[in-house]
Image (cartoon, grey):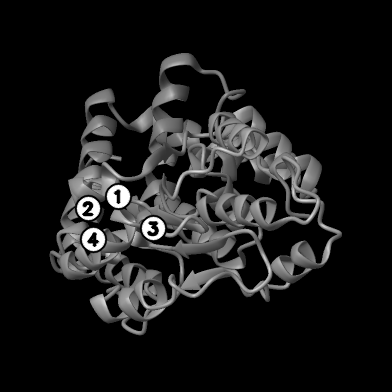
Amino acid sequence: MAGFRDIVGQEQIKEHFQNALATGKISHAYIINGEKSSGKEYIAKVFAMALQCEKGGQEPCQECRSCKQAMSANQPDIIKVTHEKPNTISVDDIRAQINNDVSIKPYSSPYKVYIVNEAERMTAQAQNALLKTLEEPPEYAVIILLTANVNSLLPTILSRCVVLNMKPVSDAQVRRYLMEELQVPDYKAEVCVAFARGNVGKAKSLASSEDFDNVKNEALGLLKSIQDMELYEIVAAIKKINEYKLEINDYLDILAIWYRDVLLFKATKDLNHLVFREESQALRRVAQRSSYEGIEKVLEALEKAKTRLNANVNFDLTMELLMLTIKENG
């Protein structure tokens, strides 16, 4: 399936695109801004499909030749801009795939749609090259920039685009999607919802990730026994984190959610609102031995560790400092 009705949440963006399709007032350039895995590319694909759909409605029909081509990623007038270097979209990428191509009329559709994923990776020269096309686009050109950081784009680019910001989806909607559409059991859905923080794509990938389950179990195992571990055992556990493909921030989030559960249980003695409520006995033990001040110190240390790792501070040193703080206070 690939229609606006399949998008979970994001009502404002859906409404904007469907109104544009209904009135025929299509902008030459859009920016969809939202965090990684939040569904930006899916929304762009649905809009591109609807623009090229031979039935011309507010939803892609999914039955015409153009829709079928788009669903199999073979629609010649929907162009996904690629880049050779992993972290950079160069001026050559933009010139070759947009600027030099845009003057060629669409093959079989009313529009030529260019989708630039990770647009924040465009160099300043690439953005300036794109600006030339944005200033005088052909009637049929539609450029969709997808970014996780709209502030990385030049003001001159922003001023020529319609900027649409992704909003976090409510926990209830994410939970319902996981349980009803993906048949995820409720206890697992709760954990995924807590981690996703309104990001449906992230919730979906966590729900189907064996790595996530393994990392969660490793992290909880470490937290339950850290008081009895020697430093060399903690260091070995840290090294093991690197075996998994999950991002380190997800690992740190597991630790943070655990300590938020401890804090909540310590304050309320209520298990019902805890994410890790199946670990009630261990949570109860930690809540009894830890002070409020100690738990706050651990949560602050987790945020500090994230900041340090994002700034490329030495991984082993950062994690050792964090684990010692947890051992002393948690």
User: Which amino acid is tagged 3?
Assistant: Pro
Residue that numbered label 1 is attached to = 149
Q: Residue furthest right?
A: 63
Picture residue at 66% right of the left edge, 42% below the top: 7
Frontmost residue, 112 versus 173: 112
Q: Nearer the viewer, mark 3 or mark 2?
A: 3
Mark 4 vs mark 1, CA separation in Å: 27 Å
User: Which amino acid is tagged 2?
Assistant: Ser
Mark 4 vs mark 3, CA separation in Å: 50 Å
Mark 4 vs 3, N-terminal side: 3
Residue that numbered label 2 is attached to = 152
Q: Are marks 4 and 2 in contact (CB under 8 Å)?
A: no
User: Which amino acid is tagged 4?
Assistant: Met
Mark 3 vs mark 2, CA separation in Å: 22 Å
Mark 3 vs mark 1, CA separation in Å: 24 Å
Residue that numbered label 4 is attached to = 319
Residue that numbered label 3 is attached to = 137
